[in-house]
């Protein structure tokens, strides 16, 4: 049965441009999603939003159109802990996709094995209250204990204002950590402000904390948006991403966030989002680490070694 989108939902860009930026061979989109299709993979009853359908076929077509080689597909909150759409996409990728799942403390060993064999290599903990009901720390620790033997990591989604409260728990998690979207800084404060300084200190606290320099379209206050050929988009976010890329070149990742859930202002052109990387990783070496070396080491270590 067809599902009705949340009112005001912005659909993905209908005709993304081809990037002008020359990408290194083997570039990875390390943060993207699949939604449904709802008639095959129903959305979770407890979801806070109903998205447009965004299938694995459409994701892989975008990957090829942008000149990328692989994807890391992150379980969307609209599917809750029902990972069937994610698993379907991973199995259809021919080994060119890895996954980040959502699991509950009661997950069975058989389900964990199934997820791992399909290509899941991490779980996501979401602390953004407008999107989910935050899970108690004790339950999250139980999940970590279950996934640690598999060599998985934890992806953290939180907002900058909450980091001080959450940092102690985060640093106690005994597996590698990956932070989504620059920790969602307050761009108005500036990259030299105390808030982002605290985030950088958090990244410095452990050698196994990674950061995605993704989603400038969510963070920017002044733009300009990545539309209509604009290749100098989201200028106010560039100093934040560039500081992280330059200080932690071996612990940064990037992703499109396709199909860009819950945007309200505009829907970016994914080709221009790729071109935005010229300002974030301004040398060929930094770009190769960001797009190839780092995601391969984290998600395809056996391929990276070979």
Image (tube, rainbow, N blue to C red):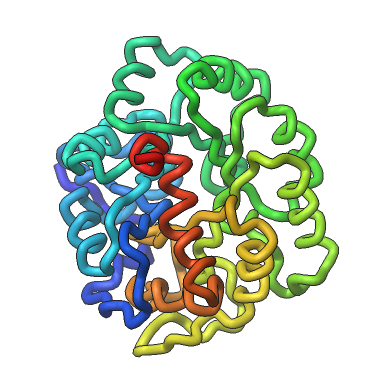
Determine whether, in the image, residue 29 is placed left or right of residue 236: left
Please determine whether, in this image, residue 284 is positioned above or below residue 41.
below
Whether 123 is drawn above or below 276: the answer is above
> In the figure, is residue 192 to the left or right of 178?
right
Please tell me which residue is depicted at 34% across the width and 29% down the height of the picture.
82
x and y percentages locating residue 158 in the rendered image = 63, 47
Quarter of the image where one finds residue 243: bottom right
Farthest right residue in view: 194
Residue visible at 31% across and 62% down in the picture: 25
Q: Is residue 235 above or below residue 155?
A: below
Residue at far front of view: 306
Q: Nearer the viewer, residue 253 or 60?
A: 253
- Please determine whether, in this image, residue 150 is positioned above or below residue 79: above
Point out the residue furthest to the top here. Answer: 109
| Image x and y of residue 202, in percent | 76, 47
Q: Between 268 and 262, which is closer to the camera in this rendering?
A: 268
Number of marks drawn: 0
What is the x, y in percent for residue 300?
38, 39
- Identified at 55% across, 73% down, the residue is 280
Question: Left of 139 or right of it: where is 247?
Answer: right
Q: Position of residue 306 (x, y in %)?
A: 34, 40
Q: In the image shown, does 240 or 54 lie closer to the viewer?
A: 240
Residue at (24% x, 55% y) in the render: 59
Q: Is residue 294 visible?
A: yes
Say which quadrant the N terminus sits in: top left
């Amino acid at each position: 049965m067809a599902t009705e989108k949340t009112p005001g939902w912005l659909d993905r860009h209908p005709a993304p441009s081809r990037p002008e930026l020359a990408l290194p061979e083997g570039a990875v989109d390390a943060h993207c999603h699949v939604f449904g299709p709802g008639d095959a993979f129903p959305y979770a009853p407890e979801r806070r939003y109903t998205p447009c359908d965004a299938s694995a076929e459409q994701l892989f077509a975008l990957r090829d159109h942008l000149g990328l080689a692989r994807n890391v597909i992150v379980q969307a909150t609209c599917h809750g802990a029902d990972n069937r759409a994610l698993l379907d996409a991973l199995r259809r990728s021919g080994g060119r996709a890895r996954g980040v799942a959502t699991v509950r403390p009661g997950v069975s060993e058989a389900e964990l094995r199934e997820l791992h064999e399909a290509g899941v290599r991490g779980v996501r903990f979401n602390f953004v209250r407008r999107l989910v009901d935050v899970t108690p720390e004790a339950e999250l620790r139980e999940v970590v204990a279950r996934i640690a033997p598999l060599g998985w990591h934890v992806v953290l989604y939180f907002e900058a204002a909450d980091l001080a409260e959450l940092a102690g728990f985060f640093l106690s998690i005994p597996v590698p950590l990956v932070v989504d979207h620059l920790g969602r800084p307050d761009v108005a404060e500036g990259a030299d402000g105390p808030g982002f300084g605290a985030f950088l200190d958090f990244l410095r606290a452990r050698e196994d904390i990674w950061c995605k320099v993704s989603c400038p379209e969510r963070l920017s206050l002044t733009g300009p948006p990545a539309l209509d050929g604009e290749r100098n988009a989201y200028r106010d976010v560039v100093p934040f991403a560039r500081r992280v890329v330059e200080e932690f070149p071996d612990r940064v990742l990037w992703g499109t966030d396709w199909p860009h859930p819950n945007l309200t202002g505009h829907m970016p052109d994914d080709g221009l989002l790729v071109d935005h990387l010229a300002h974030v990783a301004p040398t060929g070496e930094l770009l190769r680490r960001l797009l190839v070396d780092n995601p391969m080491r984290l998600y395809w270590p056996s391929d990276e070694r070979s």
